[in-house]
Amino acid sequence: MCGIVGLVSHGPVNQSVYDALLLLQHRGQDSTGIATCEGHVFHQHKTKGHVREAFRTRDMRSLLGTMGLGHVRYATKGAASNEEEAQPFYVNAPYGIVLVHNGNLTNTRELTRELFDVDRRHLNTSSDTELLVNVLAHELQAQVRGGTELDPGQIFDAVARVHERVEGSYATIAMIAGHGLLAFRDPFGIRPLILGHRFDDAGRSEWVVASESLVLESGGYDIVRDVAPGEAVFIDMGGQMSARQCAADPRLVPCSFEYVYLARPDSIMNGISVYDARLRLGNRLADTIARHAPAGDIDVVMPIPDSSRPAAMQVAQKLGIEYREGFYKNRYVGRTFIMPGQAERKRSVRQKLNAMSSEFKGKNILIVDDSIVRGTTSKEIVEMARAAGANEVTFTSAAPPVRYPHVYGINMPTRLELIAHDRKIPEINAVLGSDHLIYQEVDDMRDAIIEGSHVTDLEMSCFTGDYVTGTVTGEYLSWVEANQLS
């Protein structure tokens, strides 16, 4: 999972891109990068680490121009520790293209062969983003042969060819030197991308496209709409916007995990408030808890801060049980789910959370978490609750069991690392060490998220094993696992 942003303005954009990346830091903590465009010249700085650590005053002063894009990353393809894998990626022809990407391509083997054998393009990394920028560059080159000047129609034709060649999830923003900013989304709209607009003091149009709506609201932009699945949006250097549907059979099937865990609660994605979705997840979970754990056996409900707090509040309210904050969070430790290694995740849990014994001693505790993926955090939390004096621990998840790899841009690519894979709920409970374990039902999760919206379905492959793109096979999953473990 990554966070991306692109801006077209009439003044310097470096500070605005930087501010946007701070707001998107929760989406990736491995590396970050900013690129700006000054006429036909690109300026770029990217490095490992968090946004506040990555950019010095000298770096910001060098990022000149009125158009820019930025990226925060955690690794799902390529090496997390390799600075060469950091985005943006650049190719010098045609025109010069700089690109950032949120998602995961699932036909990288085929694309790599095509680029080398047919397109005659060279790759320097194992990043699927480098594949994507080269595919886009090749298709743009095909549109402008014979010396014709590039226009939006040719750009959209090139994106249509990208859709034909590329499989998987991709929300993408690219700058074309001297021309403008291009944004497009995969035909299923798996990863989010939202478009915003404002007028500057002189009444001129300025545009932003970003992973989450909070970037738009913070920058004073009006939300125009989500970029549609398969759609491409092009904004020229003067602020003129045009758009076209570029996919043959687009269908909106956004990732359910955005609403469960990844997105900030103050964002709106595909017309759905993340905060409201999490409240509804709590309501549905409360009904399931009531069937399996009578309220009289529970003294207090506690969230694992922060993303499970809305669901936990609703569980407590609906069950009529006292809500308490028993875990204190150290906000200077990153999100453990998106840390790159199991050992690092395990080590950081107790650095991130501390259990206050006064809230636990002698009580039957119902803990609400947003999800249980590898079980590392959950097991440590159960142990912390017992060490703090809890009499009985019931662990609940606002999401269903994660039983299958997620191949569309979330870092859970291997079956063996998932605690729920090939285990029944009592077996998972035994591994966690809790007294009771209760999960959200798949149908309840889907219905809670999409309730009241125009969205009719969600990408839920990690819960169901049904991959929306239809091209993910057992052989592919085995190949991904072999490469992940090698």
Image (cartoon, rainbow, N blue to C red):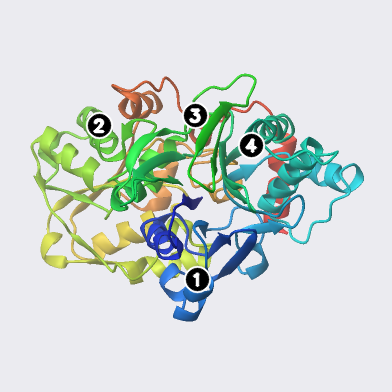
Above or below, 72 relative to 466: below
Between the residue at mark 2 and the residue at mark 3, the CA separation in whole angstroms equals 25 Å
Residue at 21%, 35% in the rendered image: 293
Instruction: Tell which circle, 2 or 4, labels the residue nearer the N-terminal end.
Output: 4
SS for tag 3?
loop
Q: Is residue 210 left or right of residue 438?
A: right
Task: Tell me the residue that label 2 is attached to.
Answer: 280
Kind of residue at badge 2: Arg
Task: Tell me the residue that label 4 is attached to.
Answer: 168
Instruction: Tell which circle, 3 or 4, labels the residue nearer the N-terminal end.
Output: 4
Between the residue at mark 3 and the residue at mark 1, the CA separation in whole angstroms equals 32 Å
Nearer the observer, disc 3 or disc 4?
3
Residue at 56%, 30% in the rendered image: 465
Q: Pick whichever, 196 or 22, lies toward us.
A: 196
Kind of residue at badge 3: Ala
Between the residue at mark 4 and the residue at mark 1, the CA separation in whole angstroms equals 27 Å
Marks 2 and 3 in Cβ contact (< 8 Å): no
Please tell me in which quadrant of the rendered image residue 436 appears.
top left
Image quadrant where one finds the C terminus = bottom right
Is residue 101 in view?
yes
Task: Tell me the residue that label 1 is attached to.
Answer: 49
Task: Tell me the residue that label 3 is attached to.
Answer: 228
Between the residue at mark 3 and the residue at mark 4, the CA separation in whole angstroms equals 16 Å
